[in-house]
Amino acid sequence: MIDSQTICALATSTGGAIGVIRVSGPDAVALTDIIFRTSGKKSLCTAKANTIHYGEIVDAAGNVVDEVLVSVFRAPHSYTGEDSTEISCHGSQYVLRKVLQLLIDCGCRQAKPGEYTQRAYLNGKMDLSQAEAVADLIAAGNRATHLLAIGQLKGHFSDELAHLREQLLKMTSLLELELDFSDQDVNFADRDELQDLALAIDRRIVSLIHSFKTGNALKQGIPVAIVGKTNVGKSTLLNRLLHEDRAIVSNIHGTTRDVIEDTAEIHGITFRFIDTAGIRHTVDSIEQLGIERTYQKLDEAAIILWLVDEPPTAEEEKLMRERTTGKKLILVFNKIDLHKAFPFPSKENRDPVIYISAKQGDGIPQLEEQLCRAADIPEINENDVIITNARHYEALTCAHEALTHIVNGLHREVSGDLLSEDLRQALTHLADITGSAITTDEVLENIFKSFCIGK
């Protein structure tokens, strides 16, 4: 249910020169008008939609709190779909708190987290996936996630789901018709045609499911483990990639005894770098715990930077490949500033090899380029539909399972009533993403729109 109370909240972060307070609800304009005064004594209640008004915020005693601009929006043409105002004040925390308190004293309620977007969804201004995109847009930490959030907010993902939903409704309508006329030996649904359609829908859903790996990597950051023996320069490399002194650097073996993680953006892609304890035999129980965590992080990482300062032995290469099966392995020779000539890896090594000086910064651009190639992230643009939300991934997976039952059922010539149930399950799972409900009326409407009964 939509809460009919008028709400208010600070819409901008504190500490800036300007702060914006947003008011939304049936009495938004009237309540704002109580504390707003213009030189011409004009009332906001008579103001036209999408207009801005200069004036002062005053308290009950008539004391001026601040000079402000008030923007007026009328339902349904506002972010929430309700009457709304936005009060642009000076950024003083005292002023902002005072204005909010005056609004609350007049009858507003402090908005809950996400309540403006929730009202926009409930008032039909956006579907659930677009509402989730608002949070993704705010949290976007790189160009790729920003573009994906913008595309989802504009409805590209919703349009894709609407197309799939329309095709599933067509299948449902055909099967419903077949059931309605089953006693008249009428066959509306060609099973081969239905199977082709189901397979085409399922292929697109599977493609969206597979995109989650890319979307999740872009959103969470691609995990990169920096591994190697003690004192080869792992912490120095981490600091160099992060452009800050994040890890302690020392020439004492075993300095890093725990895992250190931080993120950095390289060419629009977020990488989550993990500096691990140096791998060596030790009797120090704390250092041994760090080494055990190193092996755990090897399992979690998508890319491994194997840092060495001398050519690894054949046995070391074999062990590293066994531990990194299925992952991208990059062999990184460090301390080239101390070598008279670049050391060469063994002939058996087929992994990318980069030569760097983590201390001097030599070869770091080449390493960053290799990291981007290993990430294998496609060029992202605003129109791409890539799944970044775990809830969407789960719903699409459930829809795929339902479609698999449909395809198998069509192949085995299962009765239409059983197939219809699987179709409804697939429709329900897709509807869960956008928050829209599938009703019998929609199926009936589609039947009458697509077919001329009795002609």
Image: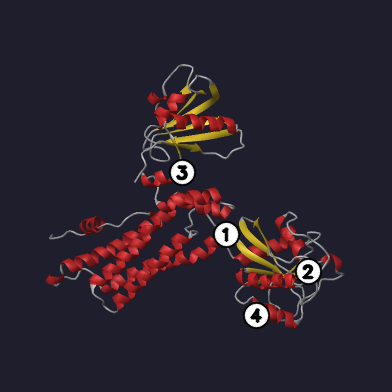
Three-letter code, disc 1: Gln
Three-letter code, disc 3: Lys
Q: What residue lies at 50% left-to-right and 19% top-to-bottom? A: 62
Q: Earlier in the sequence, mark 2 or mark 4?
A: 2
The CA distance from mark 4 to mark 3 is 51 Å
Taking depth in this image into account, of 86 and 9 the one nearest to the observer is 9
Say whether residue 376 is left or right of residue 100.
right
Q: What residue lies at 37% left-to-right and 36% top-to-bottom? A: 75
The way the protein has been coloured in the rendering is: secondary structure
The CA distance from mark 4 to mark 1 is 27 Å
Taking depth in this image into account, of 109 and 18 the one nearest to the observer is 109
Q: Is residue 119 above or below residue 128?
A: above
Q: Secondary structure at mark 3?
A: loop
Taking depth in this image into account, of 292 and 338 the one nearest to the observer is 292
Q: Is residue 163 above or below residue 154?
A: below
Q: Earlier in the sequence, mark 4 or mark 3?
A: 3
The CA distance from mark 3 to mark 2 is 49 Å
Q: Pointer 3: what residue? A: 112
Mark number for residue 322? 4
To which quarter of the image does residue 375 belong?
A: bottom right
Tell which tag, 2 or 4, sits nearer the viewer: 2
Q: Residues within 10 Å of mark 2 (few under 14, many from 20)?
A: many
Q: Residues within 10 Å of mark 1 (few under 14, many from 20)?
A: some
Q: Position of residue 123 (x, y in %)?
A: 36, 44
Q: Earlier in the sequence, mark 3 or mark 1?
A: 3
Q: Pointer 2: what residue? A: 254
